[in-house]
Every structure is written in structure tokens, then in C-alpha cells.
Image: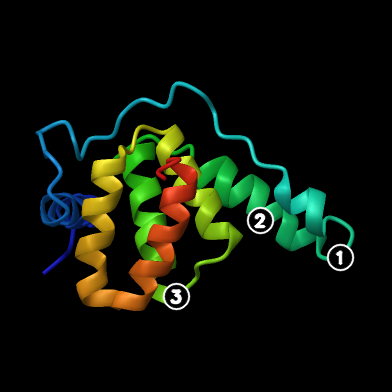
């Protein structure tokens, strides 16, 4: 049996969105057009002298190609997947805060973020979700 990666990935994302309480339409898994190209220079800015190859992969491949890809996933979906992945690994440092801000900038509402993290808490761990919610409060400016 041959798997169609795009269909499997789209179904997986739709399932995550449903579990997070998000509305899923037929268009939700087709991707939304990127109105502004994502350009990242953090790799070169921080590691350009120390690890130039890593910096190039970060800026040109990860952000330049993967984040700007417009097929099965929208940027909004990529943002949620990234936040979920970081929280699941227990990464609750400035990189998570950056990706929560990126999610907000790309249309993820506070309600969507809260529902997503609540869902993730049951599978990734309650303390990890607590840590993430502290950053969410900062980014979404919740008192």
C-alpha cells in the first residue's frame, strides 16, 4: 500500500485542528496564500561566524523554503504545528515565545491557541502547557 504523504499530512492537521476545537473547512487543508514572504536572518545574525552552514540551513531552507511553501499547509497551520512540537518537547524558552508571536501574527487567535495548548497538555504534559501559557499571556498581552 502506497501512502499519499500530502493526504495523510492534511488529514493529520485537520484532526489536530478538530481536537483543538478549530473550525475545519474543505479549504483548511489546502493552505492559505502567503501574503508576505517570510524572511529570516537570525541564523546568520547569531551563528553566521560560528556555524555558517547551520545558519544558512536555518535562514534559507527552514524559513526560506519550508515556511514559505504553499501547498497542503497554510502558514497558520505551520505555526500551530511548530508551537505544538516545541511544547511537546518541553522547549519553553525564547524560541517558543517567538513561535507563539509568529502564530499570533499569522492569524492564530488567543482562543485557538488556548484550545490547542489545552489539548496538547493531556498528551505532552501539564507542566509543559503551564509554561507555554505563561508565554501566551505575554504575547497576547493578557493580564
Mark 1 to mark 3 CA distance (whole Å)? 26 Å
Local packing at callout 1 (Cα closer than 10 Å; few below 14, some 14-19, many 20+) is: few
Judge left or right: residue 81 versus residue 13: right
Q: From the viewer's perspective, is residue 122 above or below residue 67?
A: below
Which quadrant holds the N terminus?
A: bottom left
Quadrant in which residue 46 is drawn: bottom right
Which residue occupies 16% across, 31% down?
27
Mark 3 highlights which residue? 90
Which residue occupies 72% across, 62% down?
54
Mark 1 highlights which residue? 50
Q: Is residue 73 visible?
A: no
Mark 2 to mark 1 CA distance (whole Å)? 14 Å
Q: Identify the mark at residue 119; answer none if there is no mark.
A: none
Q: From the viewer's perspective, is residue 2 above or below residue 39?
A: below
Return the x and y of residue 62 as percentages of the image width and height.
56, 51
Foreground residue among 128 and 45: 128
Q: Secondary structure at mark 2?
A: helix
Return the x and y of residue 104 as percentages of the image width and height.
41, 38
Judge left or right: residue 111 versus residue 95: left
Mark 2 highlights which residue? 57
Between disc 1 and disc 3, whose residue precedes? 1
Mark 2 to mark 3 CA distance (whole Å)? 23 Å
Between disc 2 and disc 3, whose residue precedes? 2
Q: From the viewer's perspective, is residue 36 above or below residue 101?
A: above
Amino acid at each position: 500500500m502506497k501512502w499519499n504523504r500530502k493526504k495523510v499530512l492534511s488529514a493529520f492537521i485537520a484532526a489536530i485542528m478538530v481536537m483543538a476545537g478549530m473550525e475545519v473547512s474543505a479549504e483548511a487543508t489546502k493552505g492559505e496564500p502567503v501574503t508576505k514572504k517570510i524572511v529570516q536572518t537570525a541564523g546568520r545574525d547569531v551563528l553566521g561566524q560560528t556555524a555558517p552552514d547551520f545558519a544558512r540551513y536555518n535562514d534559507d531552507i527552514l524559513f526560506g523554503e519550508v515556511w514559505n511553501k504553499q501547498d497542503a499547509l497554510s502558514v497558520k497551520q505551520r505555526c500551530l504545528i511548530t508551537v505544538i512540537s516545541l511544547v511537546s518537547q518541553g522547549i519553553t524558552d525564547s524560541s517558543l515565545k517567538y513561535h507563539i508571536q509568529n502564530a499570533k501574527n499569522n492569524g492564530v487567535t488567543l482562543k485557538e491557541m488556548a484550545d490547542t495548548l489545552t489539548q496538547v497538555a493531556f498528551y505532552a504534559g501539564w507542566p509543559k502547557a503551564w509554561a507555554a501559557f505563561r508565554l501566551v499571556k505575554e504575547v497576547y498581552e493578557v493580564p
